Image (spheres, rainbow, N blue to C red):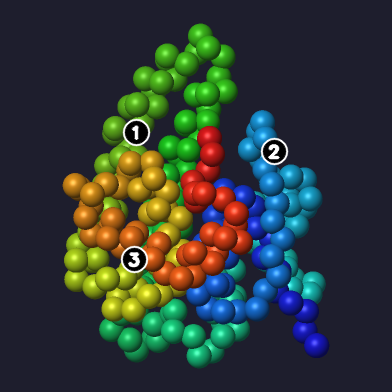
Amino acid sequence: MSEALTLHHLEYSQSFRVLWMLEELGYPYELIVYTRDAKTMAAPDEYKALSPLGTAPVITEGGLALAESSAIMEYILDRIPNQSLRPASDSPDRTRYLFWWHVAQGSMMPLQLMTTVTTISQKRLPFFMRPFVKLYVAGLEALFIQPRLNRILAAAEADLATAPWFGGQTLSAADFLIAFNMIVGAERGMINESDHPHCMAWVARMRALPSFAAATEKDGRPSMALSY
């Protein structure tokens, strides 16, 4: 008998989207939830020891320990040959699916992570340094981060105006992979109703999925956003 897949879930982290996709698929798994340090918000040492990267999410199965959201989700999809969350290679939605699958981690997440890192850095700097760093960060946001995010969101608006999901006409794994980016972006005001109505409608559709309620209950937290 093969060993069960275990999701090592860190609170307020990207592992929520793996948990969510597992619930959508109805795939059997075990869940271990880890709590961040109350002061540093860092993962506990036992979590960091699970994989060479020491980051969330992580799954284990027998002797396997696998990190990185997209790698984990691909691994799970490969184990379910009849699932519908990944368009076939000859599907008209395949190119769109691949584009947003890679945008989520390759383009959007690094920009949002920059914002996160600069926000944390400002709070932890000595008081006398904060005004100078604040000016630098404002320039970085205005000249580099926000223009690139705006272009990504404009493309998302255009695509979601033609089909309801990032993977095209049906819900796909790309929707779950980009969910962290989009929902946290909406919670923090990066995505809003007036500028991004189709994105906000997509967020509402995702939140309405029964799998979201199931994953949220198991997560036990009120929001996907990190609690800085």
Q: Which one is closest to the eye, mark 1 or mark 3?
A: 3
Q: CA distance from mark 3 to mark 2?
A: 33 Å
Mark 3 residue type: Arg
- Quick check: 228 left or right of 101? right
Image spot of residue 33 (x, y percent): 69, 56
Image spot of residue 174 (x, y percent): 41, 69
Image spot of residue 78 (x, y percent): 57, 82
Image spot of residue 95 (x, y percent): 32, 76
Identify the mark at residue 205; answer none if there is no mark: 3
Mark 2 residue type: Asp
- Quick check: 126 left or right of 212? right
Task: Examine the image and state in which quarter residue 71 appears.
Answer: bottom right
Relative to 35, does residue 215 appear above or below in the rendering? Answer: below
Query: Of callouts 1 and 2, which one flags the residue occurring earlier in the amino acid sequence?
Result: 2
In depth, the one of 223 and 120 nearer the eye is 223
Q: Which one is closest to the eye, mark 1 or mark 2?
A: 2
Relative to 128, does residue 147 appear above or below in the rendering? Answer: below
- Quarter of the image for the N terminus: give it: bottom right
Relative to 190, does residue 174 appear above or below in the rendering? Answer: below
Identify the mark at residue 37; answer none if there is no mark: 2
Task: Look at the image and tell me whether residue 68 can be seen.
Answer: no
Task: Examine the image and state in which quarter residue 29 appears.
Answer: bottom right
Please give the residue where the numbered disc 1 appears in the rendered image: 141
Residues packed near mark 2 inside 10 Å, few (<14), some (14 to 19) or many (20 plus): few
Identify the mark at residue 22; answer none if there is no mark: none
Q: Are marks 1 and 3 in contact (CB under 8 Å)?
A: no
Q: Which one is closest to the eye, mark 3 or mark 2?
A: 3
For image coordinates 79% across by 50% down, the residue present is 46
User: What is the secondary structure assignment of the residue under circle 1?
Assistant: helix
Task: Examine the image and state in which quarter residue 215 appears.
Answer: bottom right
For image coordinates 31% across by 70% down, the residue present is 165
